[in-house]
Image (cartoon, helix red, strand yellow):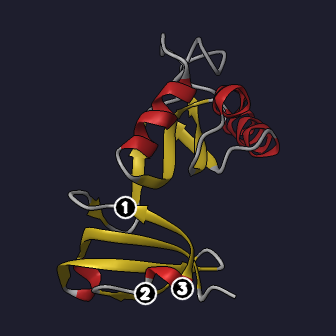
Amino acid sequence: MARYDVIIAGGEVLDPANNRQEIADVGISGGKVIEVAPDLDRSDAGEVIDAEGQWVMPGLIDTHVHVAGTRSTWDPAMGHRMLVEAGTTTALDFGGTPEGLIGGIQRMGAGLNIGGLFGMVPESTIPKDDPPPAAVRDIVDDALTRGAMGIKML
């Protein structure tokens, strides 16, 4: 049985948290990095991915994106794909509705962990500019029920 499910081989490993920048192999088993070292035994892997000439680094967490915005003219799924292509593994979307966020994921997948805030936009996602406190409570409760992680008042 192979020790590694995957070896990402020969890339330039950039890992600031561990003060590492070197050409190395990354051994992965069970979805976790278990070893980073030069020249891991490739015969001990179920799959080898050649990363020569590429950077290999921990996934990026983007804590403030605007992909599923209420005023966007693009499909939020395209923005999610762009984040993934840039190395993002987790993002928090600050501008839209749960339906906009979830709809994009359902159409194309996201390829990342994503959470979203409900954007309170007067005359768009909420009826007026200055809702009374009771209405704000209802809006927040409804947004959380629909899948938002919180709200953003615009």
Q: Badge 1, how many Cα within 10 Å: few under 14, some, many 20+?
A: few
The residue beneath circle 3 is 44
Residue at left 60%, top 40%? 110
Residue at left 60%, top 49%? 115
Question: Where is 21 relative to 66, above or below?
Answer: below
Residue at left 66%, top 15%? 127
**Residue type, numbered disc 3:** Asp
**C-alpha separation, residue under disc 3 versus residue under disc 2:** 6 Å
* Residue 24 located left or right of residue 122: left
Give the percent coordinates (x, y) of residue 19.
19, 86
Residue 153 in sight? no
Q: Quadrant of residue 11?
A: bottom left
Give the percent coordinates (x, y) of residue 101.
64, 32
- Quarter of the image where the N terminus is located: bottom right
| CB-based contact (under 8 Å), mark 1 and mark 2 | no
* Residue 41 located left or right of residue 25: right
**Residue type, numbered disc 2:** Asp
- The foreground one among 121 and 47 is 47
Q: Which mark is residue 41?
A: 2
**C-alpha separation, residue under disc 1 versus residue under disc 3:** 15 Å
| CB-based contact (under 8 Å), mark 3 and mark 2 | yes
Q: Earlier in the sequence, mark 1 or mark 2?
A: 2
Q: Quadrant of residue 30?
A: bottom right
Give the percent coordinates (x, y) of residue 105.
67, 34
Question: Where is 83 relative to 97, above or below?
Answer: below
**C-alpha separation, residue under disc 1 versus residue under disc 2:** 13 Å
- Label 3's element? helix
**Residue type, numbered disc 1:** Asp
- Label 2's element? loop
- Label 1's element? strand
The residue beneath circle 1 is 50
Q: Earlier in the sequence, mark 1 or mark 3?
A: 3
